[in-house]
Amino acid sequence: MIPAPEAFIDGLWAYARTIPMGEHPWFKGIIEHRWSKEQIVQGEIQHYLRIRGNAIFFSHIAIHAAEDHQYGLMNVLLENIVEELTGPKSHMDICLQLIEEGGISQAEADEAEPAPGTMACIEMINGFCARHSAIEGMATLAFTEAQQGGPGGVAEKLYAELRGHYGFSEYAAENYRVHAAEDAGHGGRQIDALREWATTEEWQAKIRHAVKLGLTAFTLEWDGHVQAMTGRREWWPGVAPLELKLPRVRLP
């Protein structure tokens, strides 16, 4: 018997808590004042290198939803696209503001080399969304966005520290104020959609795989922030052991 949709979502949250966003050294280091302002700007360049391609994976998800006549998913996705990619300033534009305050132009940021973790995240998310269904693509994003937004979320904490302790301007820190306001809604709507789809063993397996891939990919991106800041090729292990479903070895 498969878990009920709500129990299934609880299981996905349990996995997310093994690599919680707020405990990653990129975020925790800012909250605990371990990084310098210069290091934070370098980390944000890696963030920019990833989000400048958001339109790529959003387009893949939208195309799959349209091809399969999944109009409900298209509406959920449209809310994300409107908030992230349209208006006077996109999320990419807002991300650039902190980088610009660090004295780096968009042209210079575009020439920056992605760190190993950043590179891995970009290829994982874009490639997966190109080859899988709209709901699976949405699943790669849902639990990261849900952790970032809302009261007490990671973005709200970062915004407070960037403004208060580090002294970045409101203009520079705006990206995290916007994420705090919008991402809880993004993640919540996406998780609601996953809950509606998680009614068969096949779809639960597909969604579980997509969620794990997405959480892993974004963790690798944040590893890339730290790699660019420190010059060390290090990978965060999370806060709990990795548990995999594996066959038992039977050596003679």
Image: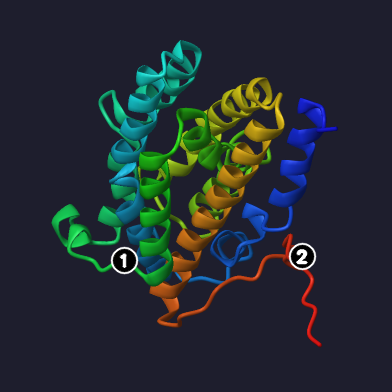
Q: Which mark is residue 240?
A: 2
Residue 92 position within the rendered picture, expressed as x and y whole percent measured from the top left: 30, 42
The structure residue drawn at horizontal position 31% and vertical position 31%, both measured from the top left corner, is 59
Q: Which mark is residue 209?
A: none
Q: Residue furthest left?
A: 107
Q: Residue furthest bottom?
A: 252
The structure residue drawn at horizontal position 32% and vertical position 52%, both measured from the top left corner, is 48
- The quarter holding residue 199 reads top right
The structure residue drawn at horizontal position 43% and vertical position 66%, both measured from the top left corner, is 117
Question: Does residue 191 lie above or below 232 as drawn?
Answer: above
Residue 238 position within the rendered picture, expressed as x and y whole percent measured from the top left: 68, 65
Residue 91 position within the rendered picture, expressed as x and y whole percent measured from the top left: 35, 37
* Spatial CA span between label 1 and label 2: 28 Å
Question: Does residue 49 lie above or below 97 as drawn?
Answer: below
Residues 188 and 162: in front is: 188
Mark nearer the N terminus (1 vs 2): 1
Circle 2 sits in a helix, a strand or a loop, which is it? Answer: loop
Residues 252 and 197: in front is: 252
- The quarter holding residue 60 reads top left
Residue 120 position within the rendered picture, expressed as x and y whole percent measured from the top left: 41, 62
Circle 1 sits in a helix, a strand or a loop, which is it? Answer: loop
- How crowded is the residue under tag 2: few (<14 C-alpha within 10 Å), some, or many (20+)? few
Q: Residue furthest right?
A: 1
Classify the position of the C terminus by image quarter.
Answer: bottom right
Amino acid identity at mark 1 = Pro
Classify the position of the N terminus by image quarter.
Answer: top right
Q: Are marks 1 and 2 in contact (CB under 8 Å)?
A: no
The residue to which callout 1 is attached is 114
Amino acid identity at mark 2 = Ala
